[in-house]
Amino acid sequence: MEIFKVENVNFTFAESSKRALNAVSFTIQQGSFAVLFGASGSGKTTLLQLLKRELTPNGKRDGEIFYKGELLEDIDAKTLVSEIGFVMQKPDDQIVMDTVWHELAFGLENMGLSNAQIRKKIAEMTSYFGMGDWFHKKISELSGGQKQLLNLASILIMQPKVLILDEPTSQLDPIAATEFMQTLHRLHEDTGVTIILVEHRLEDVFQFASDIMLIENGSIIAQGSPRIIGQIVKKINEHHIMLEALPTATRIYYGLSTFTNESPITIREGMEFIGNYKNEIQELPRNIIEQKIDKPILAMKDCWFRYGRDFPDIVKGVSLKIQKGEIFCILGGNGAGKTTLLKLLAGQCKPYKGYVLLHDKKMKKYSMEQLYKKNIALLPQNPKTLFLQSTIREDYEVTAKLIGFDKMEASLQIERVMKMLHIESLMDMHPHSVSGGELQKIAIGKLLLLQPKILLLDEPTKGIDVFAKKQLQQLLQQLRAQGMTIIIVTHDMDFAAEIADCCGLYFDGEVLAIDVPKSFFAQNNYYTTAANKIARQLYPNAVTCEDVIELCIANGLDKK
Amino acid sequence: MALFKVNQLSFCYPGEQPLLKDISFTIEEGDFVVLCGPSGCGKSTLLRLFIQPIAPIGELTGDIYYKGQELSQWESRTLLEEIGFVMQNPDNQIVMDEVMKEIVFALENLGYSTFEMRKRVAEMVHFFGIEHLLHKKVAELSGGQKQIINLLAVLLLKPRVLILDEPTSQLDPIAAKEFLSILARLNEEFGMTIIIVEHRLEELFAVADQILMMDEGRIQITGTSEMCIRQVYEQQNAIFKSYVPSITKLFMEMENDYSQCMPLSVKEGKRWLATKNTSFISKPMMKSVAKQTEKELLIEMNDVYFQYEKKGRFVLKGLSLSVCKGDFLAIVGGNGCGKSTLLKACIGSIRPQRGFVKLLGNHTYKLHSKELSQQLAYLPQNPQAYFAHTTIEKEMQEIVKRHQISNGTERIEAICKEFNISHLLHRHPEDCSGGEMQRAALACILLGNPQLIMMDEPTKGMDPIAKQQFADLLQNLHLRNTTIIMVTHDIEFTAKVANSCMILFNGEVAVQGTPSEVFTGNYFYTTPFNRITRNSCMPEMLTVEEAFDLWPAQVRF
Amino acid sequence: MIQTSSNRIRRLIIIDTGFRGLHPLVQLIYYTCMAILIMLYNHPYFLIICCFVLIIVNIMLDSWVKLLKWMKSILFLGGGIILLNTFLVTKGETVLWIIGGRAIMLEPLLFSFITMLMLMAILLLFVAFNNTLNGQKFLYIFSSFFQRTAFFTMLAMRFVPLLKMRLHEISDVQRVKGLSISHGSIKERAQSGMLFLQVLLTWSLTDAIDTADAMKARGYGTGEISKYKPYRFIWKHEGIIIGTIVSLFGICIVGLLLGYGRLEIYPKYNMPPLTLVDALLLFCITIISAFPLIIEGREALKWHYLK
Amino acid sequence: MYLKGFAMFHPMVLFFYFLLVFVILLSTLNPVLLGVFFVSGVMLFSLLHTFRKTLSELFFYLFVWLLVTLAIPLFHHNGMTILFFLNDNPMTLESMFLGMAIGFLIISFAFWCKNYSLYITSDKILYLLGTIQPQLAIWYTLLLRFIPQCKRNFRDIQSTQKTVGFYATSSLFERLFGFVKIIKVAFLLSVEQTFSQIDSMKARGYGLQKRTHFSIYKFYIWDCVCLVWLIVIGILFLLNFKELDFYYEPSLKALTLTKEMSLLYGILLSIGLLPAMIEIKELVKWKFLKSKM
């Protein structure tokens, strides 16, 4: 029986005139695992919020939403609260209490349960999730992944029938994200709870999902099982941007053929599928950019850093050279280090042993002004911290003034940047009110006003959708073409594989194995892109989806 | 092309019955193979034959091909790197005292450079996300973590095949699930071939590509999980029936058209049940709980506090509990909730910092071992700790002597018959398999017919058959009005045997009651079968057996 | 954020800063040099200075609590030596005074005093050694000289906790069975103790078989063994330090060979005035012994200025 | 979470205990009481911290003490016995004593505050609040999480702004202005977070009905005993306040140690030493257990 039934719902926010949702209608069966995806700003979140009555934003809504066959409005608040659970995007922002056990108890307290009942529920929950050892911890001591797990647990403890998650993993690093998804899957298997999930990274969700919905500016344009969703989207538009969001295996499949039977979705299936291609040609005739070995623009000579005298070393004797005009990616897992390394490169921290060379001159010797005016620019992990003014335009103007442009030139520069990034429409908004991808863009815009020679980016792809990612990628390549040196610290292997000229693996305070992406990922056995995992038996050097597709086409099918 | 090809393989240890009798099968690259069978049927031996360096000595006929070539033809180094092996007991395989040293151990042996090691460790660690473990001492890790470390150590050699011998038998359910999910990922994402011996097949049936069911040194049944199960039921093979997940059992027993797909997981089970909307006989009374009041109190705990070191947290925290004569109490709970500590307190090997533990009214930690041994008996987690003498017979005689039991020899014979361990009497305990040892230990314990038995994780690493027998045994002990306290992770087992049970949670009692009371309410911490039956057309129940007698007649054919 | 997190880390692992942060080899060299020098030099000036510096070193490496514990015993011992030596030994010529018809000589007094100083210095060194160069590091250096021995030491270190754990379990179980080492007559206790050991042995052995298999399965003894090096040796840094220490040490030894820095007590004690060379040697020794101080100081300054 | 020894008592009891201590400490300047609480406070502190730390603390407070003792007479000239004149201000013995007393008061107060903060942690305060008024507790926690959040944001923004021209201006005014801006934005960010926290509160049914309040604290018999004991002493103290009260000028009150007075002092001392005693018992017990295990 269907647990949710949405009949052509329209929604418009109070302040805006444009419809956030129009004529959305779908049904969700009990015990199914539904995944929504779509570009950010397409109204996914709004839709979810409509399903969770307490969170419904104020605005005008028509059309009906049925929960278990009766109107959402008619059900009494208490059942609704406990039966529909909602997990939000940011781990930190939904934790209310300051200790784990209290956070778990919170919901039940609101339900007015007795102490004994609460204790029992908490007990079984922690036993199930194996949280026993961090049960007494303070929230501030938890890692992002743990926080999100805690959120999940503190929702589940109210025994919901439906679980709604809004991009739960977008703020997590890949490992934590995968773990979270595994947990979610296990939960679904064990308890058969209905799950409605909005997600950008479909790679590890797809195999669990029972049906997929693609939502585009306010209406659901495609709906179907994971294996056929691709076709449906393709029918609508051959090169729909959201095809990029599909798992690698699927993308390769559609890249290679227009077969109409079911597509592979897991890596393993991908391997089997690739298996019927020949592998005579291992290499693609590519014009590899020859590494011009001139003086490095930025170099580290074994640098050691820690945050205080009796703290552990975070950077342990890193030395690396970064050539002018290349895109250098520093990859690595979660935990302390990568960001610190970037700070060292940006001159925000000073190594206590070793030194950083910028244009063959020690970093120490530069004044703040020399360093940050027309020289180095750093995009922090949270771009919001870049903006002080109330609108983006103001902020840009202030920055321009600071660089020392006169009115005339300032406006010219701002124009240039706007054109470059297509952010004309955003200029008069408040910096905090734009979506993740857009924020990323305007932040880079602001940095570009400073006309840096070196651009440092900290986790630029965190929590942004495929579309924004593609744009960012193009932008960075464009900048590189203009001779800018770009250094990126990221978890996102696929992104790195796409754009980097050079990758380094950061581990335990050292940068190991600096190499061009191709051989970098080819050497790695476990820490490598999905495409490479799929293809490594046949074409060990193919690291991106495109490589694989081209190679396959070049080789052709294996007759036998 | 087949990765492994075994044909007419047979093997016997020198001067014994042949253990493996012409076994032949093939394993494709990238398969997930599960090998199961009752303990002592030669699974482990078969596995070890694949690993050159530790292959058992004995006469071996038939041959094993690896990638089309005789196993013996390959040079040892390649085999070492390409075939990884993980064993049963996490503790016994760890060589070094620090995690980092431990995982690079193999690399060191094969003479890799430090840089290469660091690189491999780095990418591995990034894949599994275990930075926080790297610099720890091995002694600080939990069992699950240890086993994962073992796996990593093997994976660092970039093997093509993983061979695992009951890797999860020593772990608690959560850790086991985690471990298995890692295996599944390895198989999914790297197409790694995995050959695993397991007893707990609930999760594995869903992921396995091929299942080899083995008994008496022969491969009885093979095929995909679904095929296997069907065959099992066609042959009415009692041994392998016990391996089948509960919901599937119900399906096979009750479903009259086999056409529809067989439910292997809870989710599928729910779906299947949803199709049946038949009226059920209303639930009968649960196992009657005897009144606590008029029975004499055996063990009494009054809010007990205990911690192992000064700054450490309390392992027992205001725990109160009372066990009366004739109870069968099962204590369940997550890791580190203080279950084992509680037992320790009961047998008085620790002294609580606050509160008291009394056995028949006197403090346990004061009791002399003589008196203690008259009162109660304790079956430890690993029975190796139990046997103090060279043969089981000696052990038993010793006990007879200690308890001044008249007609000792008859007793011994009787008990041996009951536990059918007569053939083991003259063996050294260490020569018996785990299950046998357990049974022997229990027999010894019962010789002194104690009024109170305590058991720590008795079902750990037992195969389903043995478990079934064990359950029956416990039950008729209970009928004989013996008091039993059992600490376990195995909820299904608990639901089957115990008549009262409690969930322990960080050092205090969270819930106590009859299994049905405790578990049916629960959402997560309960048997899979209960999860299936919850808000379905069936009344909530814990075990499939209940379902059998509740199943409406008109459906049965 | 970072503060809190690394605070947590700090609680988990001992952070090696300053002298501890150096490559273990350097530390080892320092300690050996010091030990040798202390052994050889018996001139009170030198010893006194060594002791003084080493005390500061110990305080610096905050091991002074341990130190105090030891100090008591050492002072007691020293006092004992002095008394005995002075009262029993009658060698020497300069008579200080006469007690009960026994001549108390200066020489034995002096001699025992020096011995005491030496003992003290060695002890100080030892304490410092103990809490800078922990087992791991020592083993690390050790293993680069004696591969196998070190390896087996590690094995042992791994198995000690295991054995402990097992012994606990066994004693629990057997206690309930009625065997215990805490009650009953000596004979019984002894017997049960033997039984315990027997059980422990059989158990551990059977498990050790597994371990051996695991090792074999991971290619132990298949050929040349490489070694994982957790500590990095940077010539520019560690090299220089070693260089200085060793050269200073050399100077001191040469000085010794030339006969400085020792004073002969028996038969007749005579204290030669401090020559320039003595002063030089004194200086060298002070530098060597103060090495940890220098390094720590440098560190401290650096952080002071980084802030 | 430090939950051993004295901290094992129920938060309520702890709270009352410290309340009583502070009341007694602050209500009189009785030298004996001051001495009692100074000693017991320092003792407790040294039990909970390393010997080294205690020393350094004491050293610091010694200066404070001297300062106060000297400062008071300088500005406060009542008192009979005049010692000498400092630029024709009389320095009196009484005010000297008063200074000392106040110095002691401050020190012992400081130490007791340290102990207090160690025993009554935020989640205990939370519990206490919760029992009185659940809503209050929640807002308190929100605040608890809000402030550090604010701080962190401030730090982040500042460090980023440094790279995009916060350095540039040299004029103090603009810097100040910038700071204000940064604070504003930091605050804004934190507020955004708080809003979504409130959302998640609503999503979990906050304010639907009267909340219950889950706690991991139990009220044991010994808590009860302790509480009664505290109350008794409180009453005793109030009854004998007259005798206990002490004045320094015009001339020192005579300190008469009658039998019952000394008994009273003894009782008050017992209050002061209670936690220390318990901690010591703990220590001893562990010594003993060590030898057993």
Image (spheres, coloured by chain):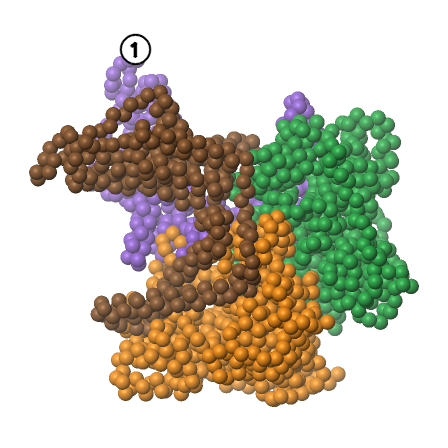
Chain colours: A orange, B green, C purple, D brown
Is residue D213 in view?
A: yes
Q: Residue furthest left?
A: D88
Name the residue at 39% across, 68% down: D188
Q: Residue furthest top?
A: C101
Give percent across and percent down for residue A267: 65, 73
| Residue at disc 1, secondary structure | loop
Quarter location, residue C261? top left
Q: Residue D105, percent across and down?
A: 29, 37
Q: List x then y, in percent, for residue C265.
A: 29, 27
Q: Is residue A105 left or right of residue D277?
A: right
**Residue B504 in the image: above or below residue B426:** below
B126 on left or right of C111: right
Q: Chain of mark 1?
A: C
Residue with the most extreme right position: B557
Dot 1 amino acid type:
Gly
Q: Is residue D9 above or below residue A227?
A: above
Quick one: C12 or B256, which is closer to the camera?
A: B256
- The percent position of residue A364, horizontal first and vertical second, equals 29, 66
Residue at position x 30%, y 31% in the image: D245
Report if residue A294 is visible in the image.
Answer: no
Instruction: Decide: is B66 above or below C69.
Output: below
Q: Residue at x 37, y 49 (%)?
A: C19
What residue would you read off at disc 1?
C100
